[in-house]
Amino acid sequence: MLGKPADPWEEDNRAIFRFNDRLDKALFEPAAKAYVRVMPRPVRTGVSNFYDNITYLDTVLNDFLQGKGRQGIADTGRFLINSTVGILGIFDVATRMGLDEHDEDFGQTLAVWGSREGNYLILPLLGPSTERDAPGWVVSSVTNVLAYAVEGSALLPLSLLGVIDARARARGAFEFADRTALDRYTFIREAYRQRRTYLIYDGSPPLVDFFEDIDESPPPGGVPP
């Protein structure tokens, strides 16, 4: 398991966690269930592909910031192919051509650069994060193509559809936490930290990160997270 988390703001975090949870139960969970019930799976797949593609420049940028030049070139090709041949990303043509999807963001880049994880925090509406990961939301918003390609009244409904699609895709994880966790706050905190460690190490974290302390082993090219 990971080392003991830095969570000095746990009381405030739990209050925000409860707020987010109530909002989810009241709005986003029902909307996601209705979306899954009404929309056929092929349509949902196309919608998910579209939103994955319009946010993919975040991965491309962070590929290069982490010094992954070859991966950055491949991911640039993936974005261009899916945006054109894949009709705005609705069809994932690039994967069929052998250009695999990657998941990079600015929080991972900061880890590779040597930034430590910092304190755990819950962001209103956005959910789990850390002092290191939080700035990534700003970078992700800047690289989101939707903000530049769509103007006026269409931006809000398209953004809301993206939120509902993301919630629908995560419904299995939410249901698993509801069924198994004695303390959902702690469960989600540790699941988030393990997931972030997995991403930082590109899917191959050293065993020490799961059995000793996360601060003991540095990520690729960096200092401990």
Image: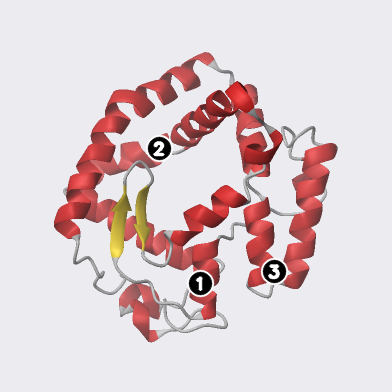
Task: Name the amino acid, label 1.
Answer: Leu
Work out whether mark 2 precedes mark 3 in sequence or the reverse, and give the earlier one.
Answer: 3
The residue positioned 23% from the left and 38% from the top of the image is 19
Q: Secondary structure at mark 1?
A: helix
Within-10-Å neighbours for mark 2: few <14, some 14–19, many 20+: few
User: So how many labels did they put on this image?
Assistant: 3
Q: In the shown orientation, is residue 80 left or right of residue 25?
A: right
Residue 110 % position (x, y)? 51, 72
200 shown above or below 16: below
Look at the numbered discs 3 and 1 and tell me whether their residues touch, using CB distance below 8 Å.
no
The residue positioned 20% from the left and 41% from the top of the image is 18
212 shown above or below 24: below
Q: In the shown orientation, is residue 102 left or right of residue 96?
A: left
Q: Secondary structure at mark 2?
A: helix
Task: Name the amino acid, label 2.
Answer: Gly
Within-10-Å neighbours for mark 1: few <14, some 14–19, many 20+: many
Task: Name the amino acid, label 3.
Answer: Phe
Real-space CA distance between mark 3 and mark 1, rounded to the nearest whole angstrom: 13 Å
Work out whether mark 2 precedes mark 1 in sequence or the reverse, and give the earlier one.
Answer: 1
> Which residue lies under the disc numbered 2?
172
Work out whether mark 3 precedes mark 1 in sequence or the reverse, and give the earlier one.
Answer: 3
The residue positioned 62% from the left and 25% from the top of the image is 152
Residue 10 % position (x, y)? 18, 59
> Which residue lies under the disc numbered 3?
64
Real-space CA distance between mark 2 and mark 3, rounded to the nearest whole angstrom: 33 Å
**Res 55 seen here:** yes
The residue positioned 69% from the left and 69% from the top of the image is 64
Within-10-Å neighbours for mark 3: few <14, some 14–19, many 20+: some
Residue 220 % position (x, y)? 56, 80
> Which residue lies under the disc numbered 1?
110
